[in-house]
Image (spheres, helix red, strand yellow):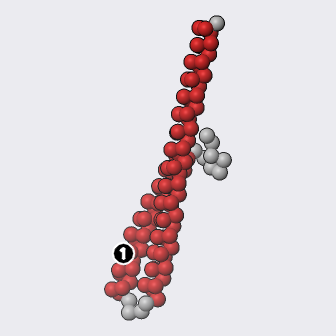
Amino acid sequence: MKLPFLKADPAKVVADTQAALAAVETKLLELSGQRTAALLASDGTDEVAAIERSIEAGERAAQIHRDRIAALHGAVQRQAQEAWLQRIDAAVADTAKGLARWNA
C-alpha cells in the first residue's frame, strides 16, 4: 500500500531522518561542551542561558526525529504486511483457477 501522505519511499525517509537525528545529536554534544566551557570561563549567566536554550531546542528536535522514525518504522512494517497479504491473495486466486481448470 502506498502511504498517500508520504511522497518518498518510507525506508528512504527513515534513513534520511536517522541522518538528521545523528546531526542533531552531534550538535547537542558540541553545545554541551560549549556550555561546560562557558560555565568555567564566564561569570555571567547570559551566555550559559543562551547555550541552554539551544540545547533545549536541539533536544526537542531530536525527540521529533525519534518519534518520526518510530512512526515510519510502523508504516514500513504495515507496507510489508500488506504486500505479503497481496501475495497470499494472488497465490490463493491462482490455486482456485488451477482447481477450477482441473475440475472442469
Residue 5: horizontal and vertical position, in percent?
65, 51
Q: Front-most of 82 and 5? A: 82
Where 18 falls versus 59 (above or below)? above
Q: Residue at x 45, y 75 (%)?
A: 55
* Mark 1 closeness class: few <14, some 14–19, many ≥20 residues within 10 Å: few
Residue 27 image position (x, y, % from top left): 44, 68
Q: Residue at x 45, y 80 (%)?
A: 52
Q: Residue furthest bottom?
A: 43
- Position of the C terminus by quadrant: top right
Mark 1, secondary structure of its residue = helix
Quarter of the image where the N terminus is located? top right
Q: Is residue 100 left or right of residue 28?
A: right
Quarter-of-image position of residue 26: bottom left
Q: Measuring 46% from the left and 70% from the top, which residue is drawn there? A: 59
The answer to whether residue 54 of the structure is visible from this angle is: yes
- Who is closer to the viewer here, 5 or 16? 5
Looking at this view, is 41 or 94 the one in front? 94
The residue under label 1 is 33
Q: Is residue 12 visible?
A: no
Q: Position of residue 96 (x, y in %)?
A: 60, 18
> For the image shown, how many numbered marks are present on the structure?
1
Q: Residue furthest left?
A: 40
Q: Amino acid at mark 1?
A: Gly
Residue 40 position (above or below residue 83): below
Note whether 59 is above or below 1 in the view shown. below
Q: Residue furthest front?
A: 103
Image coordinates for residue 95, horizontal then vertical, percent = 56, 18
**Residue placed at 39% from the left, 77% from the top?**
34
Question: In this picture, is 52 found above or below 103?
Answer: below
Most foreground residue, 13 or 38: 13
